[in-house]
Amino acid sequence: MIVLTTTIIVSWNLIIAPSHGWVASLPRRICVSHFKVHPRLSLSKETQQQQQHHRQQHREPDNRFGNKAYWDESYRNSLGNILDDDCGNGQHNTHDPSTGTFSWYCGWKDELEPFFAELVPPGINPSVLVPGIGNDACIRDMFDAGYRRLTAFDYAPAGVECARRMLGPERLRLMEDLRVADARSLPYRDASYDAVLDKGTLDSIYLSGGKNKELSRMHLSMAITELARVVKVGGIVFCVTAACVDEVQRSFDACNDTNGRWRQIRDGTLYVTEDGYTSNNVDATILVWERIG
Ligand SMILES: *[C@@H]1O[C@H](CO)[C@@H](O)[C@H](O)[C@H]1NC(C)=O
């Protein structure tokens, strides 16, 4: 994981916005949105194509990420670095060697928050399920932003241990549940959550099939069926994905009508929040479905 982090952080990405004639150079790491743009800023078709191409280049699957032993070992290695009850001090958007935490694809503040909170405001005290929590500091920051009714799981026991240390006893006491579980067969009741927040867990489930695409699709479809099952009518599945956007899309379309009826509300194309955060500058894609029946 450290190798991945390094490659993500050290290279630089040039984002060109010709309509305003400025050039901004941003760290090339996977994240939903680093910066605010004016809502009316539109990128030329050519720039969009460049960005699309660029995203595809960085989407090569790495099969290690579908391997439970890999995760268990990787989390075990981070365990020693995670400080007990580390409350952090602000953002941990990437790998933070001082605390052993890491945020997959994006951090919370100014990155995931504007997109998630718009759909699931903390004020409604929503129950949120987080698959594959591991040492993702984004989830801790989300808790601190007011999402208290959190249920999280990881299929690697060391991942759950990482989460335990990262969250600390106080948050653990306040959140609803944290345990070892398999996304393909969840221990939760039907229709019990207002939202599922997947950050790359479906990606690693898909990659668990290795070169066997049929197996990959089967695992993914089992997981998506389970996530769909546990969401209430009116609730959402919010998915930040990079490795298998099309497969997640296909699999979700296929489960429509078997576990509820679903309406897609974010399809990975450019989205701008009311506050002007744009989903355009991404290496991961946001897909969101709302359960309508
Ligand atoms: C699910 O099916 C309904 C019709 O039964 C359709 O309106 C809706 O768009 C479908 N949703 C998805 C995500 O495919």
Image: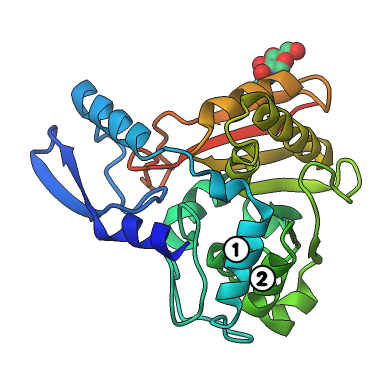
**Closer to the N terminus: mark 2 or mark 1?**
1
Q: Nearer the viewer, mark 2 or mark 1?
A: 2
Left or right of 82, for residue 9: left
Where is residue 132 drawn, in percent x and y? 67, 55
- As helix, strand or loop, the secondary structure at mark 1 comes to helix
Can you identify the residue that label 2 sits on?
163
In the depicted view, which residue is nearer to us: 42 or 48?
48
Q: Residues within 10 Å of mark 1 (few under 14, many from 20)?
A: many
Q: Are marks 2 and 1 in contact (CB under 8 Å)?
A: yes
Residue behind mark 1: 139
Q: Quadrant of the C terminus?
A: top right
Q: Nearer the viewer, residue 285 or 270?
A: 285
User: What amino acid does circle 1 point to?
Assistant: Ile
Q: Residue at x 56, y 49 (%)?
A: 65
Q: Horizontal and vertical percent for residue 131?
A: 69, 52
Instruction: Give amino acid for label 2.
Output: Ala
Measured Cα–Cα span from mark 2 to mark 1: 9 Å
